[in-house]
Image: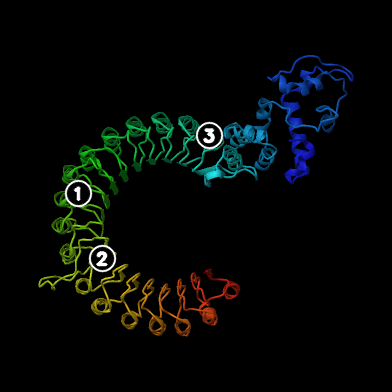
């Protein structure tokens, strides 16, 4: 960059000052009067510079040395550094001199301005280690802080994604954050432009780095992690995803040089294997969380080593790995500190592995267990897990196709501390397993969720022997196509203390079944989700508003096509504490909106009318009345509301976010 273009920085006077400072520092650092052996006004110097310059960069300085001159002022040097036909250049100093000058600059503002001069200066400055800055050395020796310097505690966060992630941006982050609290968290995602150069700058300028996340950065390899491990010894969390060039060497260097590492995530890194996990097990004694997904070289040896070595490991997630029953047996024996465990798509693990994990009875701290797409989960192994995990509170089963009603009931009886149970796509579970689970009088189950379980059919007759659940407070039954009115009425009798009810996508129920459940609830419902229950009408909504209007806070009727204005009138009259109402894709009209806005005690905060094609501009006044309390209004797909009305609402309801 030339001086003539200095005004492009936006700080022309500051630029000239920095350049004057740099030339002065250059003369002082290289001791130019001594080098030129100056002793008179017109004496020549024909010697060589002590700086290691190449021929392409030396000519300007050599010309300056061989011209007769008197003791000149700094600003007179500009004309000596250039020919008459050229603009004076600032790119005459070799990197070695720039490095010495940059590390002597005091103040973050001066360094930042200097880094803005050119990409060349930026890259040189980004390679100055924070520990090499003269200002930091003085600060440490004097044990004091200047006004423009702060301790590098590492509280700043930076995230780069896609085209925004380049080496130059990383260098700028390195320079900009090094003296402003220090970079604490860095995330780089989806970039083909980031290389070792950018991470060299981060490593040298950001020793305070504690969290590093690399997702889909194919050009980053072991060299980058080696640089990070050499400088960033405070690293606590490392997340590597789709980084094909990173191998055991890079991860092992992090493990050996970053003893504070407490969280490690590895996903789809095909060249990371057992050796690196063994290095982590040896060196990272504070490791608390590990997540490994789809790494073909990681097998039983690596998993067993790290699980048997860690004494403080609390969170473990294993997905799509080629491990066998022995790994689960190790988890059951040595996982005494594990509180959260997730096992997904472990196709080589059989019933024996899950049975051994439960019967080892070593998971004495396990409170949350999630198992997805594992064929080894059967009635026998599930019951063993329930007996072995004595403090288990949250259990999730998804796509475990060999679990039957008997195994489910046995598990819930064995897991005496269980509070939350989620079943999704467990298609061999039937209505009898559900009733057996909910009627367990010794159960502490508070939340029960059933999603896409296709084995459930409607009851033919009501069972003669059942017991009410005293603990269930939240019930979710979503998209179970065989679930009908008889099941719903029976659920109402089994769970009379419900607060939250979610019946999304139950096409088999109508007003009759829901009305029976509403009648049996002894405490008021506070959250109700009836999304896409297409056979419900105004009749049951009016009954709900009448029975539970005093406690209802959230009501979702999205996709209930037979719901109309009568429902809104009943809600306005009875639901005094309702905060969130969704009647999208229903039959309501302007009349219904008017009734809603007329409720004298309504305190509605969020209203969604998306897809309500019969609501028009006539509702503008009603929206403005509701807008006194609204913070969110969804009018997407309301084609009879003009853009001018929307614009007016945006102006008048300035506190409210409006979607249109």
Residue 491 coordinates in the image, percent (x, y): 21, 71
Q: Quadrant of residue 175?
A: top right
Q: Quadrant of residue 206?
A: top right
At 19% from the left and 66% from the top, the residue drawn is: 457
> Are the residues at dot 1 and dot 3 in contact (C-beta closer than 8 Å)?
no
Q: Which mark is residue 5?
A: none
Taking the image as drawn, is residue 551 in sight? yes
Q: Which residue is mark 1?
A: 377
Residue density around tag 1, few if under 14, some if 14–19, many if 20 or more, within 10 Å = many
| Nearer to us: label 1 or label 2 | 2
Q: In the shown orientation, is residue 300 left or right of residue 246? A: left
Using the image as rendered, state which of residue 24 and residue 528 is in the foreground.
528
For marks 2 and 3, give the CA distance.
Answer: 52 Å
Q: In the shown orientation, is residue 618 left or right of residue 45? A: left
Using the image as rendered, state which of residue 311 and residue 615 is in the foreground.
615
For marks 1 and 2, give the CA distance.
Answer: 25 Å
Most extreme residue toward the left, as rendered? 464
For marks 1 and 3, give the CA distance.
Answer: 44 Å
Q: Quadrant of residue 414?
A: bottom left
At 30% from the left and 34% from the top, the residue drawn is: 302
Taking the image as drawn, is residue 488 in sight? no
Using the image as rendered, state which of residue 294 and residue 562 is in the foreground.
562
Residue 358 coordinates in the image, percent (x, y): 18, 47
Tell me which numbered mark, 1 or 2, is placed earlier along the sequence: 1
At 18% from the left and 62% from the top, the residue drawn is: 430
Residue density around tag 2, few if under 14, some if 14–19, many if 20 or more, within 10 Å = some
Q: Which mark is residue 195?
A: 3
Give the answer, above or below, for where 302 lies relative to 507: above
Residue 361 coordinates in the image, percent (x, y): 18, 46
Tell me which numbered mark, 2 or 3, is placed earlier along the sequence: 3
Residue 595 coordinates in the image, percent (x, y): 45, 85
Q: Which mark is residue 481?
A: 2
């Amino acid at each position: 960059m030339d001086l003539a273009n200095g005004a492009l920085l936006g700080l022309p006077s500051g630029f000239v000052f920095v350049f004057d400072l740099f030339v002065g520092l250059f003369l002082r650092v290289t001791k130019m009067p001594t080098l030129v052996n100056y002793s008179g006004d017109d004496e020549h110097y024909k010697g060589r510079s002590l700086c290691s310059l190449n021929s392409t960069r030396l000519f300007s300085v050599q010309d300056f040395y061989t011209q007769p001159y008197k003791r000149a002022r700094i600003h007179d040097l500009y004309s000596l550094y250039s020919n008459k036909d050229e603009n004076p250049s600032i790119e005459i100093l070799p990197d070695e001199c720039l490095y010495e000058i940059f590390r002597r600059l005091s103040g973050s503002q001066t360094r930042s301005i200097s880094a803005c001069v050119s990409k060349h200066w930026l890259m040189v400055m980004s390679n100055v280690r924070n520990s090499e800055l003269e200002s930091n050395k003085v600060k440490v020796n004097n044990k004091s802080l200047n006004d423009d310097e702060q301790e590098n505690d590492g509280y700043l966060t930076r995230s780069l994604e896609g085209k925004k992630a380049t080496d130059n941006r990383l260098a700028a982050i390195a320079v900009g954050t090094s003296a402003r609290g220090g970079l604490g968290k860095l995330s780089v995602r989806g970039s083909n432009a980031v290389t070792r150069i950018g991470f060299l700058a981060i490593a040298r300028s950001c020793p305070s780095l504690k969290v590093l996340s690399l997702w889909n950065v194919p050009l980053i390899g072991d060299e980058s992690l080696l640089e990070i491990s050499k400088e960033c010894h405070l690293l606590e969390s490392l997340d590597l995803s789709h980084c094909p060039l990173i191998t055991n060497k890079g991860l092992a260097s992090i493990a050996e040089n970053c003893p504070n590492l407490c969280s490690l995530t590895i996903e789809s890194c095909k060249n990371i294997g057992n050796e690196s996990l063994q290095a982590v097990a040896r060196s990272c004694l504070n490791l608390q969380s590990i997540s490994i997904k789809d790494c073909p070289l990681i097998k039983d040896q690596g998993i067993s080593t790290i699980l048997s070595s860690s004494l403080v490991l609390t969170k473990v997630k294993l997905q799509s790995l080629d491990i066998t029953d022995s790994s689960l047996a190790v988890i059951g024996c040595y996982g005494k500190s594990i509180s959260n465990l997730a096992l997904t798509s472990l196709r080589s693990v059989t019933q024996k592995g899950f049975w051994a994990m439960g019967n080892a009875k070593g998971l004495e701290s396990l409170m949350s267990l999630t198992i997805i797409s594992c064929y080894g989960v059967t009635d026998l192994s599930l019951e063993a897990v329930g007996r072995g995990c004595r403090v288990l509170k949250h259990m999730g089963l998804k796509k475990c196709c060999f679990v039957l009603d008997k195994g489910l009931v046995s598990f819930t009886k064995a897991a005496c501390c269980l509070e939350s149970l989620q079943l999704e796509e467990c298609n061999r579970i039937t209505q009898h397993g559900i009733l057996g689970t909910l009627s367990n009088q010794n159960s502490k189950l508070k939340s029960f969720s059933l999603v896409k379980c296709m084995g459930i059919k409607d009851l033919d007759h009501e069972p003669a022997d059942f017991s009410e659940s005293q603990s269930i407070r939240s019930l979710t039954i979503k998209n179970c196509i065989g679930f009908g009115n008889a099941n719903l009425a029976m659920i109402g009798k089994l769970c009379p203390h419900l607060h939250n009810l979610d019946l999304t996508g139950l096409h088999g129920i109508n007003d009759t079944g829901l009305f029976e459940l509403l009648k049996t609830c002894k405490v008021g419902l506070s959250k109700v989700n009836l999304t896409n229950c297409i056979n419900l009408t105004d009749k049951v909504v009016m009954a709900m508003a009448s029975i539970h209007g005093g406690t209802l806070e959230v009501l979702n009727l999205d996709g209930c096509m037979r719901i109309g204005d009568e429902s809104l009138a009943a809600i306005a009259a009875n639901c005094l504490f309702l905060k969130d109402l969704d009647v999208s894709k229903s039959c309501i009209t302007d009349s219904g909106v008017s009734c809603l806005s007329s409720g004298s005690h309504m305190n509605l905060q969020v209203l969604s009318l998306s897809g309500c094609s019969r609501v028009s501009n006539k509702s503008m006044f009603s929206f403005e009345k509701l807008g006194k309390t609204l913070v969110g209004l969804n009018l997407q797909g309301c084609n009879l509301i003009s853009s001018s009305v929307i614009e007016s609402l945006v102006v008048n309801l300035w506190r409210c976010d409006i979607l249109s």
